Structure formats: structure tokens, C-alpha cells
Image (tube, helix red, strand yellow):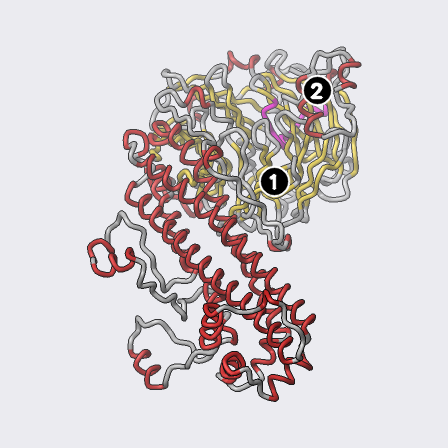
Amino acid sequence: MAQSGSMKLLGARNMSCIVERMEWNNKMDLIAYGTEKGEVIIQRLNWQKIVTFPTPGEDVRVRSLSWQMDETLLAVGYSNGKVALLDAESETIISGLIYDDDIKKVFFSKAINSKEKLDSYTCNSKDKHKRYLLKLPPLTNIDPCLKTLDQKSFPKGSPCFLVVIMRSGKVHLLLLGALQAGSIDLTQHILHPEEFDVYDVRLNGDFNAIYALLRDGHQLKLLHFHNQVLEDCISPMLELASHCAHILETKNYINDTQQCLLEAWETVQLEMDNKLTKYANSQAYGMISAYFLELHVFGYATLEVEEFLFEGLTEKGFKKIANSVDLSLKNLQGLVFKQLTGAAVNMFYFLNTIAGFGRMSHFFEALISPDVASEAMRACGAFLLKVHELQRTIDILVSNMKLFHSWMIFTILRLSHQEIPDDMIFSGKENIALAEFFCAMEPDLPDASEDDELSDDASAIPMVTTRTKFNLERVGQYLENAYLTQLQSVDPTQLWTRLLAENDCLAQCSLLVPHDKKLSLIQQRDKMFNAIDAVFHKPTESISGSFKLTTTVICYDLPQYIVESALDEEHELNYDFVNCSYHVHEATKCDMLAVTVRWQEAMILEFSRADDCLLRCTRVHLQPGPFTPQLHENYYNLRIVDIQFYNESSISMLAQTLLPTPGVRPHSYFLQFALSATRNQSTQHQMAPLVKLPDATMAHSIHDIPDAVTFKGLDGVCEMLAVSGSRKVATVLSDRRRKMTIFEMEIEEEEDDTEMSQASFLDMSKDSVLATGANESDKLEA
């Protein structure tokens, strides 16, 4: 335990903003704090600011901060329902979640020990996809401003749960920040939903139960929920969550690729519109096709065409247009052939693996439905077929446009009586292809009678009344969220198509991938995403339905208000002050919860995870007892402002004087409270369906417990506390949360490794943890 004399002032700074939340990293010298503007700032122990993450919206507040255990990942909960995962190392937003309610708190659980949890199920498939799947190429041409919160890679740190607590009482569990691992609505387990408030919800050290600290009417309760699915399936859940993270990354990659496809296609349309499409639109529908066909077959050009070719275009000018269009089409081809096809293959691989997991019913029966996983595979296969269909359509367009560009240059040279190179002479097959291209450039429009007949059929594909020149919509229709208007013609030489057409039972077989030729690429993608989302509904339903309330612990009766003085009845002091901190003690297999039940009283609950199922309770208050020796006058009438576990053996408190002298600012104190000194004053209780602690426990004054607490006077009116036993630091906020003061705890003879070079702050932070006990020269070299 840190004695009062073992606290060393490292520094104090007046911040340029109001700090509303702050949290120390578990191992590195990093502290994160949220401002009143909704920003999240990460800085080092030596006040070096690392990165500032902007607010996600106007009038958005930071509700909660939580570092992933021993990692550089920070979870942030905002008042608008957003949860962002921020990476301090790469200074990027990893991913984000959006809920429809205000967030109370978010936190990462402790790391899941794979060696302990994988005793009955082992799978050596971790990152095995890297052996078989090529790494997807980067999307270098995507606009950075189009990036959203959910379009980055998911964290690859230690496996753990992310718990999101809503003010409404709903709690969501996410494994690896990706897999929805169940949820629970606490309002379904209370007696007074109209007088409800949730303070904290925590996972126990074995990941098979949760503790929910809440207000139910006028009672402060701690509800213990056991979950059998979490207990039995934690190892398979890790495998499923890993693949879920890969699938979500692939989904985001597909969305980014389609955005790039839209950009490339808009470039193609822009290049064509500069000269060719603009001129074609000035002519009556069908005339451009007739003019070009006449020029190609008979070699005769009308005056309008000659004027367009010789005044509007030149050989060099058209070559420039042709090169720009060819380049954009090549980008389009590459995006479909490499990025989109590769992403679809990756998605099929991961879904196939999940479908294989589903056949291992002994481990995955509660998590995966084989039929749903197989349907997702079929939807992914259909998406891959649609990608190949789009690829063939683009290839045909590229071939036609190259042939058309060559013909235009050939025509300009011929009509201007210039010498034509030998390599520009067209073969008979190419001439036929050109004629077909001109005929299809402006196809005949359907008659009005045909439109009326089609309108009577609700299931019919809607027909367009106009078509773009050069028939570019054959490709553009795939990038719209609407049915295709120009279907690909059926190739009579394809035996597989004929086989499916002649055998309905084979066409409807679930073992074959369906190919819906009416859907666009966007529609096929949405259909695949919906099928994938259905795969992960079962783990959420199974885990959510397995929460069973096993114990209700009544901690305290909370009065609503107490009048501070009879002369000042208008200013009432709210005694409903609940602040809590949670710690998992691995050595003793014990879950520890420290909670303030009043401004002057706190309760330390220790839940044993052993077979004895014991609950140890210690109640302490800051008021002097009847046999307390005379104290300094400042130690009377103290109230608790903040409380946190410093480590498994001690608790840090921040206190203020309750009734200061008029005109005198209240005093603030930092208290370090040793749990070992209170073992004799604690009571033990057997975990039962109902445990009433107020009737079976008694509060003890901390002044009457020998060597239990030490006091450290602080400057200013301190309102918030952040401690880190692993980093041996404590931070307090004073002067209306604008002044940050950092103390070093447990000072030894050696100097602490707080002097850092200008190298990578993460490397130096990690080295500082490993360099404890090294001499001064070794530390400077590190």
C-alpha cells in the first residue's frame, strides 16, 4: 500500500478544456480523457499529447472510456449511442457501433486465457486463411472523406468481451468487438421499472456470469446472472467471433470496392459525355446508330457527321478521349476482377468454415444453425456469380469501346484522305462486331401497348422508356439498387444453362448456387449481407435466453433526499450518490466490487468463484466512531467524491469536506485504503436467491481500523480520480475539472522510468514496463 509520504508530485497542468472522463492505460504511460466538446485526447505521462479524436457529432458528450487490457485500443461510449474503438498506436478509428439509446458505460473485460478455456475444444485454424487466401489489394483510389467508422480493420489484440451498457437498462456483449454475444434487458428483472437506474454491469472472472448494480425503487441492488451457454461455449465462441471479425472486414471491403466502382464508372461517363454523348444527345433517338451504321457499311457520312468529326474532333483529340476512357474502363475491370472477386472468394471461404463448424454439433449447436449457414454460402455464391456476370459485361464493353475507338480513328483518317496504317484494317469478324455494336447502341423502344401489358403484371421487370447513347447502361445498371433492365442474352452453347432449364428439380436444388439474372450487383450484395446477418442471430438468441437470475443482493436502502439544514430547505443534498469500481483478483479467484452507498459510506463486496460460493462484505464510512481518538478538524465531515481500485489489495478514494466554513473553500484528500486491514471487520454470506446486507452487516469507521487508510492533502477542490496500480500513478482533477495533477505512487530508491526519448511512444511505454529494476544507463538506452 502506498503511504502518504510515498506520493511524489510529477506535475500539474491547467487544461484548455473541461475534462469529463479520464482513464489510465493498464501497462503503458498513456492516459485518455474526454472533453466537454466530445473530443477524446490521449497523452503520455510526460504531458506529450499523442492524438486527438474529434467528436462524432454536435453536442455529443463522452460517457465512458475503457482501455483494452495491456493493449493500445480504447473503447469510447458517446451520448448519441455511438461506441467507437480507437487505436492509439495507429491513431485511427478502428470500428464503430451505433445504438438507439444513450450510453451509460462501456468497458473491456479481462483477457480470455485461451489455454484455460480451450481444454475441451481445440482448433488450430487461427489465421489459417492466410495460407490459402491472397491478401486483398488496397483500395488506393477511394476518397478518404468517404471513410466511416465501420470501414476499418477490427482489433487483433487479446481476446476479450466488449460490454455496452445503455441507460435504458439494456446490456450488449460483444466478443472481440465483432460478434454479438448476447444481450439482456435489466428492466425485466426489477420490481419498480419507473424508479430504475443502472450504475454498472460487469462480467465475472470466469466469463459465465454478470453482476448488475442498479437502483430498483429505493433499494440499491446487485443482481447476479449466470449464463450456461457462456460457460459451455466460450471456446467455440472465440472461433466464431474470429471468423465474424474477418467477415465484417470483408463486408466493409466490399462496400469500399463498390464505392470505387461507382467513382470509376462516373469517370467513364464523364469522359464519354465530353464529346461523344453530348453530340449524340443532340440528335433524334435512333439517328446516331443509323448514321454510324451507314458510315461503316457504305462509307458515306452525312454533313452533320462530317462536321462533328472534323470540327468537333481531331485525330489527336479523339485519341486522348479514347485513352482516358480506356484507362477508366481498365480501372473498372481491375476493381471487379481483383478486388471484388477476391473479396467474394474470401467471404465464401469464411462462410464455408462457419458451415463446417455447424456440423460439429457437440460444440457449435447453440451457436450455429447449419441450414442458415448453408443458405448464407449460397447467397455468397450467387454474389460471386453476379460479380462474374458484371465482369463479362464490362469485358464486352471494353472490347466494343476499343473497337469503336479504333474505327473512329480509322474513319477520321479515311475521310481526311490520310494514310491508314496496315494494323488498322478490320477483319470480317470485327466488321460484324462493329455493326452489331451500332445496332445495339440505340435499340428499338417498346410500343405503348407493350408497356400497358407489362404494367398489368406486377412481377414484370420495369422497362425504361429511354436509353443512354452507346448503351452504357448495360454496365451502369449493375451499380444501381434496382432490377436490371437489359438482361444478358442466353448463350445457346452453354450446356449447363440448358440442363437447368430442362430440369426444374435440379434448378431448385439447395446444393446448387442460384443465379438470379434480374438482380443488380447492389441488390445481390444486400441479399448476401442479410443472409450473413442471419447466421449470427442464433448466438445472440442462445446467449440472451440463457441469462438466469441466481442471486439478488440488497446492498442499501437509498433515501431520495435529505435536507442539508432547516434554514436552507431550498438547496437539498442528494444522498443517492452511487459510484463503483470493479476488479478481478486472479490469484484468489475472486470478483471485487467497491461501491459508495452514501456520500460518506462505501461497501466492498468480494464474490468467490470457488465452489464455496461465498460473499464477503466490508462496510466502511468516513465519520469518526464513538471511540475514535481526537482527529484533526479537517478529517471530520468528509464525503466521498470518487472511488477506484488501485490494485487487488487497496482502494483509492477522493474525499472532500462536507460542510466547509462559509467563505472557505472545502478541502480535498486522497485516501489509500488497505483491504487486508479490514478482514476482521468483514462478514461472510452464502450466495442465496436473496441476500439482505443491511440487516447482516455493520459499517465501521475507517479511523478505528489500525493502519487501514492514509490521507494525502490536495490543492484545490478535486472532483475526479484516475489511478493505475500497474503504472503506479494517480491523477486528480481540480478547479472545476480544468486542472490535472499527476502523482507517482510507491516510490522506491530508484528513479521511475518517466523520462522518454522521442522514439515511438508505444515502444518506450512497453520498455518502461520491462525495465523495472534496471539501472539508469540501461533505461536511457531503452
Residue 715 place in picture, x, y as percent: 77, 30
Badge 2 marks a residue whose secondary structure is loop
Read off the residue under disc 2. 745
Residue 765 place in picture, x, y as percent: 69, 25
Residue 55 place in picture, x, y as percent: 65, 49
Question: Which disc, if any, is residue 557?
Answer: none
Q: Which residues are magenta?
A: 631-646
Badge 1 marks a residue whose secondary structure is strand
Residue 575's place in the image compared with 78, above or below, is above
- Residue type at the position of mark 2: Met
- The answer to whether one can see residue 119 in this image is yes
Magenta segment: does it hold 552? Answer: no
Q: Residue at x 67, y 20 (%)?
A: 769
User: In the rendered image, which quarter contains the N terminus?
Assistant: top right
Tell me whether circle 2 and circle 1 mark residues in contact (CB < 8 Å): no
Q: Nearer the viewer, residue 777 or 305?
A: 305
